[in-house]
Amino acid sequence: MTTPFSDLDQFIALPRVDEIALSPDGERVALTVSTLDPDATGYRRAVWSVPAAGVGPAVRLTRSAKGESGTAFTRHGDLLFVSGRPGADGDDDDTTQLWLLPATGGEARPVTRLTGGTGGVLATASGSDVVAVTAGLLPTAADGERVGVVSRDAALRKRRDDKGVHAILHESYPVRYWDHDLGPDQTHVLALDLADLTEPTDAEPLTGVATDASATGTTDTTLPKPYPAHLPNPIDITPRPGRSLDHVSGALTPDGSTLIAAVGVHEARGQRTVLVAIDVATAERTALFDDPDVDHELPALSHDGTTIAWVRTVRATPAGANQQEVWVAGIDGSDPRRIATDWDRWPNELVFASDDTAVLATADQDGRAPVFRLPLDGAAVEQLTHDDWAYSGLRVSAASGVVVALRASWAAPLHPVRIDADGSVTPLATPAALPAVPGRLEEVETTAADGARVRGWLVLPEGDGPHPLLLWIHGGPLNSWNQWSWRWTPMLAAARGYAVLLPDPALSTGYGLDFVNRGWNAWGQAPYTDLMAITDAVVARDDVDETRTAAMGGSFGGYMANWVAGHTDRFRAVVTHASLWALEQFNGTTDASDYWQSIFDAQGMHDNDPHRFVRDITSPMLVIHGDKDYRVPIGEGLRLWSELAEHHAGPDGTMPHRFLYFPDENHWVLQPQHAVIWYQTVFAFLDQHLLGAEWERPELLG
């Protein structure tokens, strides 16, 4: 009998929950759920409604060819989302725009028609109809002028398209981010007043837009369509942003008059993050917290609009990382003070409790990610959930006090839950039923040579064993193996009889600042010895076969896989995905070289550079890399492959190593059929070297 974990086609077809939103009254949860499209080459998202009370089925709200995402509720309970569906008024443009689905029922309708599309909802106001959205605008179209910017942007985009121009002129660093080029447009924040959304008419007047060539600043006689008068007029509240808003986050005051936002401030190379208040009516910006070598991030706003909370972090240096501190202050920046002073955890998200007396947070801890309550009066932090789950996406209703979230573990993917004041958790309905997994989780740990506790999860397949072991090293490196990933799914290996070790070595989050700094500027030291120590503890078990082991990892995990390959011959095979290979080369070509060069000094970079040990590699290696990976550029994979050939190829050029290359994938390999190829190749490689199977080239690789 096949299952989704023994059949990759079934696995990629499993529906998966991506996002959660909560209606203002706390009665409805909106879930964004991805399902495989009919030709099995991509995923399509739809929004579903789920009762927050925990009683009642999930009901599908949206359906379109392009799918929906980025959900948020208005103060009236209407649902906002972004989608590339054609306009409801007959417009055939399928650029991603903001849409509104009325709470009272009926069809969704577009709210924006921006030529470059809408990025998503940044914030909604709880006491007014103002919404802040992100959107890309070309620099010369914006040029600091708030009136007519949408039409100027449309005209300039049309000229670029007509001329077939795709070039981008950069004036500052960086130029890329993860998997996409930055530019030619710049992210702006636009304010919309949904009260101005009216029904379209056959001959509507134009408001606030240019209607002739001279007004748009171009001599083109063929102009884009004018902005529809029945839609809210987008007002640019962030003129001349440069690249400061590429990662903007923030919240609107209840009356919609002020946006509290974390924005970038440009430095010689890169940015630091500061907190600002932006007046929506005038676009006037006031710096609230701006310090050299400090990042102010994750701003949250109390429900009454009087208090802000955020995370303040002094920048790391080669000497070590610093604590991520939670601070609160008045809306105008007055009376700033740190809370949770004795809490040695790094928050993943912040949201105010319904009564505004505390901040709720999630944070990695001991291979989980519980929900915590951080009182504003400085009292001790209270842990609300005490289970083996990792929580995310906290949403709070001020009206009802309802708290909902998503949770997951390595035994189950993301699904919605309600969290009551006493910490009890109630699963909610979901259209993405939790699959039955083919393995069980067991917690394992050991003591490192310096006395540190090193722990992890062990996924055990069915049967008594002894099972071949796969050491799977997480990325980050500031990360923890604490919840399900559709891209890195150890249950697929368990279905094939492998035990999978998911350890958290030095540099992992959830064990305190000192544990992180054990591996700082020394990736090849404590992280490596921690991995070997916990592997030693696991292979000593009767149900694990010490003679059949492999190591694998992606990103930082790929770096560690490379380091492992150059420092031990204990593993029969090593799989390295999107891996750092030559640190000096990587630090100058990655999309965020300022950060990577700031956390290593010259000696640390040299001492921990895996490519220096290529001659010592004896384990067969499977190298995997995507050409569109800008965080770990393809040059790392190409150089690793070249140096493996230089030092280990036979006279006829053959070698035991393999290189799986994806010309159109990025850091993660996201296309469903490419994910199938990824797993097929990995398991064929592991089966060959651990199980003695014949090498079997995946069929679609020719």
Image (cartoon, rainbow, N blue to C red):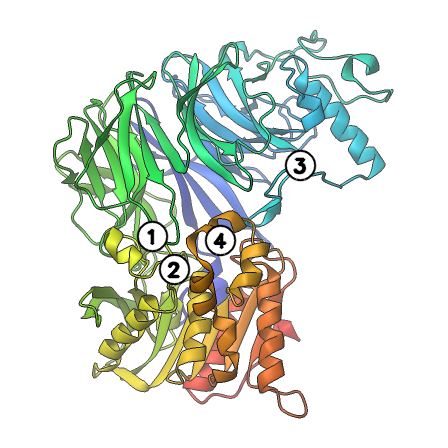
Label 3, residues with CA under 10 Å away: few <14, some 14-19, many ≥20: few
Which residue is at a point 52% across and 83% down the rendered structure image?
615
- Marks 2/1 in contact by CB < 8 Å: the verdict is yes
Which residue sits at x=59%, y=22%?
112
Left or right of 86 on screen, residue 489:
left
- Quadrant assignment for the C terminus: bottom right
Image vertical order of residue 511 relative to residue 338, above or below: below
Between 613 and 399, the residue placed more toward the observer is 613
- What is the three-letter code of the residue carrying label 2? Asn
Residue position marked by numbered label 1 in the rendering: 320
Residue with the mark numbered 2: 521
CA distance for labels 4 and 3: 21 Å
Q: Are marks 4 and 1 in contact (CB under 8 Å)?
A: no
Secondary element at image label 3: loop
At mark 1, the secondary structure is: loop
Label 3 amino acid? Glu
Q: Amino acid at mark 1?
A: Gly
Q: Is residue 465 visible to the viewer in this orientation of the structure?
A: no
User: What's the CA distance linking mark 2 and mark 4?
Assistant: 10 Å
Crowding at dot 4, Cα within 10 Å, few <14 / some 14-19 / many 20+, comes out as some
State the mark number for residue 597: 4
